[in-house]
Amino acid sequence: MDYQAPERDAQFIMHDLFQVESVWSEIPQLQDISPDVVNAVLAEAGRLASEVMLPVNQSGDAEGCRWKDGEVTTPAGFKEAFKQMADGGWLSLCGNPEFGGQGMPKSLGCLIEEMFWAANSSLFLYGSLSVGASLCIDAHGTEAQKRTYLEKLYSGQWTGAMALTESHAGTDLGIMRTKAEYQADGSYAITGSKIFITSGEHDLAENIVHLTLARLPDAPAGSRGISLFIVPKFLPNADGSLGPRNGVSSGSIEHKMGIRGSATSVIHYDTAKGFLLGAEHQGLAAMFTMMNYERLSVGLQGLGATELAYQQSARYARERIQGRSPTGPQNPDKAADTLLVHPDVRRMLLTQRAYAEACRALGFYTGMQLDRAKFAADAQAAKIGELLTPVVKAFLTDRGVECALLGQQVFGGHGYVQEWGMEQIVRDARIGQIYEGTNGVQALDLVGRKVMRDGGQTVVELIAEMRQTPVKSNWQSQFDAACDRLAATTESIVRRGQKDPALPGAVSVDYLDMMGNTLCAWMLGRMAAVAPADDFGAAKIATADYFFQRILPKTEGLAAAIEADSDVVMKLPEAAF
Amino acid sequence: MDYQAPERDAQFIMHDLFQVESVWSEIPQLQDISPDVVNAVLAEAGRLASEVMLPVNQSGDAEGCRWKDGEVTTPAGFKEAFKQMADGGWLSLCGNPEFGGQGMPKSLGCLIEEMFWAANSSLFLYGSLSVGASLCIDAHGTEAQKRTYLEKLYSGQWTGAMALTESHAGTDLGIMRTKAEYQADGSYAITGSKIFITSGEHDLAENIVHLTLARLPDAPAGSRGISLFIVPKFLPNADGSLGPRNGVSSGSIEHKMGIRGSATSVIHYDTAKGFLLGAEHQGLAAMFTMMNYERLSVGLQGLGATELAYQQSARYARERIQGRSPTGPQNPDKAADTLLVHPDVRRMLLTQRAYAEACRALGFYTGMQLDRAKFAADAQAAKIGELLTPVVKAFLTDRGVECALLGQQVFGGHGYVQEWGMEQIVRDARIGQIYEGTNGVQALDLVGRKVMRDGGQTVVELIAEMRQTPVKSNWQSQFDAACDRLAATTESIVRRGQKDPALPGAVSVDYLDMMGNTLCAWMLGRMAAVAPADDFGAAKIATADYFFQRILPKTEGLAAAIEADSDVVMKLPEAAF
């Protein structure tokens, strides 16, 4: 397997599509980031992905993680590769400069995370959870907590984990049972069990910082009675060195469909010492700082799968000879033409390619909103960022699985055997639709919470921005129609949803799909509009043409399906299922 | 894992929807099959599936097949379960009564194959290839060949395999290299290597009958120079007993994404003795007898996955409590409501359910066409059967993967771990889209061959039949519109395809999807029209309502996408991929 980080495409998105230098030049903390620096950072990240992370991807899947007596051994080579990622400063890229972070913009981070996810999802998961944990501690921790944990997390000396799920409480965190009891020293004693804890135990770092949700004795019932605690595997001494082993341990690891190099633990808390992070009973809101980061990041995992699958299948299609072109032999001196002469093979490749390019731009755009919110206190950008987070998480991971399946399909029978690695991409990508809130939960967050709570106003504002930025002129009227369709569907859902509480959940997945595809058209149409007059630009235009003609029309069918009442899903009695 | 064969639904399809007794009563060979016999056969097949085949499904996946020195060991329990399937007469069900077959109609066979595929795809594969091989020998063999092979294949004493693919020649069989040389005794010496040979070596039967494609010395180039040979693992003596070991052997088995209980071999032919089956150079046409059977059967494999995933996820959704209904608590005395209160969970279940019911009826309908063609020499039915074979193969396996993914999604994180078996259904179902001709090849067969060669005439005739059989009255106008849409799209493809040779391949997958969904609407609409006035009937109507409102509208988007030129997929230069 081979992977070439999409550097040229990333540069095009930053410099030509969004002209980030002019955006960043107005933000004091970012104004010194030159195009040269950015391009060097991208190149170095790409090198790490291709040369360090990718080589242990297939072997990590084959070997998997091993659990023995509470200790987890990661696959051969993971420790060395993780150390290179950490030593290269990749876990501190967007971190707080006060505590050793590099303070780079999230948008740039999105392009880089994609590369790491593509090259080795299992390995980067250990990093992604560290970044998320450090973000959460930075946002909600005391000065002392930040001093104790951030630098260690940024350097990869310690790693992070998020502990939410219990065996009976997945999506529904309100019914969790893990409890926290006040201790005389101001800490808390945590008791209970969590499941599905990614990076909950492993051998890549000397300490693991579990951000753990638990319930205080006086907590109100439900999700408003949950507090967040820092529960380190080893208790830090005052000087930052490792103290005694804490009562938090791995009971076993899961045997999973994919991401087998990532250890997923059952974690037992046996009166483990925990430190309150943020305010009592406000734990879920604090945890959302981490979750929102992870959701965006997991979306980029889906994008990484799309790009990886595309690169493999495009190469295979260029090299494999099989059958003849419908217009007559193209390589008459060979036994057959390449797979690329077959229109349906091209359809499969163009779908992957269009989604990779569109989703990359969409992820970057979302990162830009978070940058504006963070660095320029731009409330409107924060709102758009919040709206788009579930879209990026769900739409990009849905496309990740779709495109991994398409890439696998291009290989025919060779895609089904383990040797070529295509089936691993499918298995690895599949988790993206499930963890960090299933994609159904993301869709409900989008429609049930974000669209319904402001009567669709934020979507209306986003559509207004979409209409103001020109797409390539030959697609403008079709794009305007797609915007009209999205606006009308949004209005219809808000109107009907006010009377029918089941409606948002009944149509949410189709709506998210429609919005995602409309946003992709926007990104591709804009990229085609600013494409340079060379081969690179011509390919951008051809890819946009494909999307506008072959994929965007499918939103017509989605709009029609969304017009159905909730009754059509709700009326079948429970006993009939 | 648990599986309840859909007996009631199968009975409804036979007796109420298609009233097969009145069809069969006009066919001498079938007129004695009473409803009681049919229902008893269904019940017995269901029992075998649930009680014998299912219990070794997950264990078979975990254990897999082992290869050592050319011998393959199947997972524990496979031998005993296969023997029960064979001893029960299930491999001879539709076989030729002259040689020990039971002469039952294919349509009934479709309902039964679905059950076996659902319960254990890996195990039934060994059976499916035996049935296909016996069909091919029955159609093209000499009297002596039929006498030698059929009874043994029907009884499961011997099994079948089909050997087409070579490492450089998958879809493109014309470039295969395995050669056959004339021998003085009238047999042929076969030399070469094949890959991806399902059931090519195993320990379930005393002999394996390889139907092998090879090229004679004087053969014309391409696919018109391929001959078909019977190459048994052990050469039969004149009395039918096993003679010497033949020069055909397994070089290795594949490590696959799924169907791990099914052994997929590299097969080496070392001047193996082969016997010509059918005429010289006509091998591909003869092999198509087997391939067409396997294509229909593989479609039913997809249906089996859909039904299995539906049953597991419906049960999980009934039992798992998580979250609250959008209309307020339904089980206020419990910590949470069941998953079934969530509209999007219902969407995922109803999609699986609607496709299971529609595809079952569509498979049965297709089987009926083959029955009419075989027993009543009905040329029109033969044409419709040919048209529908690629649709059933591709559409049902596409839905199999889609529905397995939906079923897995209902389980959340529990769907991603191996324990619950949901991820195995996905991995097992995935092969259906790839083998026996990828689904892209099926779509090209449908559009490039079957639609284009008669100018869409057969589709027009099928649509005429669709219009003549009433669907439930409230959906009649929407169904008529869907028929109009399919007719107009067919006409458009034929018209444009005559000038543009790349067009059929460019739109074929979307067209097959559109046709499949329109046929599903037909089946569900008809079932709703004849549904009894009880809970069973009410569920049929609710399922049809869901499909007409939430899924059928998506064909509008497909129709719009199909209007794109082939240029949109063909113009990107090869070097740009």
Image: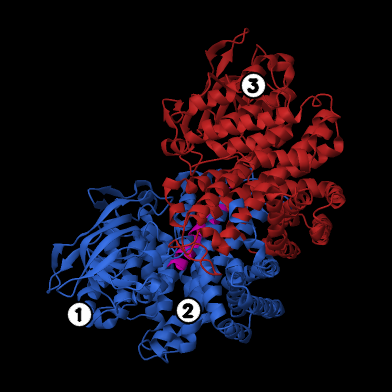
Chain colours: A blue, B red
What residue did someone put label 3 on?
A: B154
Q: Amino acid at mark 2?
A: Glu
> Which mark, by number, is residue A144?
1
Tell me the crowding category of disc 2: few under 14, some 14 to 19, or many 20 or more residues within 10 angstroms, Cα based.
some
Tell me the crowding category of disc 1: few under 14, some 14 to 19, or many 20 or more residues within 10 angstroms, Cα based.
few
Instruction: Identify the chain of the residue marked 2, using the numbered disc in the image.
Output: A
Where in the figure is residue B520, as x and y percent of width and height? 72, 51
What residue did someone put label 2 on?
A: A386
Q: Identify the residue shown where x is 84% and y is 52%.
A: B470
Q: Identify the residue shown where x is 32% and y is 73%.
A: A219
> In the image, is B418 to the left or to the right of B391?
left
From which residue to which does the magenta span run?
A: A298-320
Q: Please tell me whether residue A306 belongs to the stretch shown in magenta.
A: yes
Prevalent SS, magenta region = helix
Is B341 located above or below residue A559 in the figure?
above
Q: Can the viewer see residue A329?
A: no
**Marks 3 and 2, how far apart at CA:** 63 Å
Q: Amino acid at mark 3?
A: Tyr
**Marks 1 and 3, how far apart at CA:** 77 Å
Could you tell me if the residues under marks 1 and 3 are in contact, i.e. CB atoms within 8 Å?
A: no
